Amino acid sequence: MKTPSGASTVFDLASRVFPGWTDPVTGARVLRLDVRGDRGESDVWQTLYQQSRCFLDGGRKVLLRTSSRSAWARLGGRTQVVLDLTTGERSFPFPEGRQIIEVWDSAQTALLVADGPDVAVELWDMRTGQTLAAELTEGWRFGGTSFLCDGRRALVSHFKGRPHGEPTDSHFHLLTPGRPSRIVLEASGFFCNHIQGCPTDPDLYAYDRWPAPRRDDIEQVIHVASLDGSFHAPARLDARAVRAGSMMGMRDHYLWTADGRRIVSYFNPDKDGGPTFTAGDPDSFGSDFNHFRFPWILSALDWRTGEDLAARYPPGRWGGHMGLTPDGRYAVCAGGPGFDCLYAVEIEALRSGWNEHPVCAYPRTVSRGVNNEPFPYPFVLPDGSGVLFNAGWPGPEHGVYLAEWPASLRKV
């Protein structure tokens, strides 16, 4: 497969560097992205959280993270690395003592978090190494940060209280280069998180608005708002759209399609679904929580009209959070326990019910289903030539893999 310019794709270049195999069903090549240390060690790295932008240099480089204690010690406290997919080289182009939440390639900016008594969030220029804007939480807890689609501004979430279990207040600050930060949203009695800018409007964003304490008399937590406050509403659900059964089964983890029309997420329609909370700590999920037991539905919601293209995941297909292809045609998912397969779902074809197109099988993954356990977190390369994902935990095959986009799914 070649790019329009005739150059090799990112996957083609990576296949010259990393070892792999050919999937016997789809014919797609699959690469193991071992990230080698200075002395030849192979550390366990993972992709970022689903909503976070991770690619640089047009997808030739990717930001990865690790929870490996040995890697943390060996790398001087660093828990993230930029891996060059075309050479296998790794680099640390960010200041020490910072967690990199996401990067914006075209603007060469990054969102950094410095842990301390109060968490400082920085909008950082990768070209100059300068901080463009910053916000200190000053006693508030950090709830996340995300770019707007201009790649130059960002929103930061802060909250006070214990989400879901006790009264909680939230506010969002806007970070703008060369200007003081300002509050653009305040919400008393709500935990607000999972901010994500609309991909086609730099003054529009989505976020999750959770009543705190929790209650089940709501239909939607995903809200869409403008920076100036002139528009603020839940993403619509028309009369035919299936509702979640309880608050903790709501459409929650989501991605915008590239055209800004649909919000892709998943939800649980069962009224008795969702986790319990640990006694005395309403911020923690109970030990009986196993998300693989729920009957999840994949949702592609037109947030303006409320039209929802949705279908229930067949057994084993739900494996956590999905990715999207750059053209917005497919949601890319990874199976749960017993279905160790990366596959694509054509979004428009959900009008006729469930559909799936296998990309590749991957090393067996074991999960107990507990919250915050490693997820596949697939990311499609910007040129569409492959998909990065995590697989193989907890054994020696645990790591990041890159699957070639199958020829059968490519546009003619």
Image: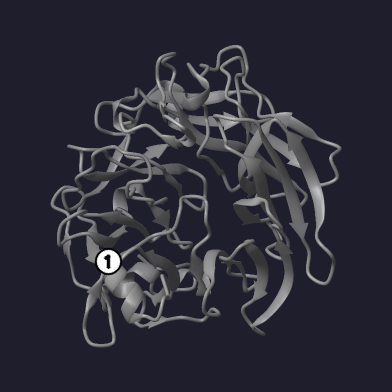
Q: Is residue 230 above or below residue 351?
A: below
Three-letter residue code for mark 1: Val
User: Which one is in front, 288 or 280?
Assistant: 280
Residue 334 falls left or right of residue 246 = left
Q: Position of residue 75 (x, y in %)?
A: 36, 80
Tell whether 187 sits left or right of 206. right
Q: How is the image coloured?
A: one colour
Height in image: 203 above or below 320?
below
Q: Residue furthest bottom?
A: 39
Q: Nearer the viewer, residue 104 or 117?
A: 117
Number of labels in the image equals 1
Q: Quadrant of residue 270?
A: top left
Residue at 68% of width from left, 68% of height from top?
Answer: 123
Residue neighbourhood size for the residue with mark 1, other residues' Cα within 10 Å, grouped as few (<14), some (14–19), many (≥20): many
Residue at image coords 42%, 56%: 380
Whether residue 88 is visible to the viewer of this picture, yes or no, is no
Residue identifier under label 1: 44
Q: Residue at x 20, y 52 (%)?
A: 362
- Can you say which quadrant of the picture contains the N terminus? bottom left
Disc 1 element: loop
Which of the 4 image quadrants contains residue 67? bottom left
Residue at point 19%, 72% (across, down): 19
Q: Is 391 placed left or right of 78 in the picture?
A: left
111 to 315, vertically: above or below: below
Q: Position of residue 158 (x, y in %)?
A: 67, 49
Q: Quadrant of residue 321?
A: top left
Q: Position of residue 284 (x, y in %)?
A: 44, 37
Q: Up-down: is 17 above or below 333?
A: below
In percent of width and height, residue 401 lies at: 28, 61
48 or 325: nearer the viewer: 48
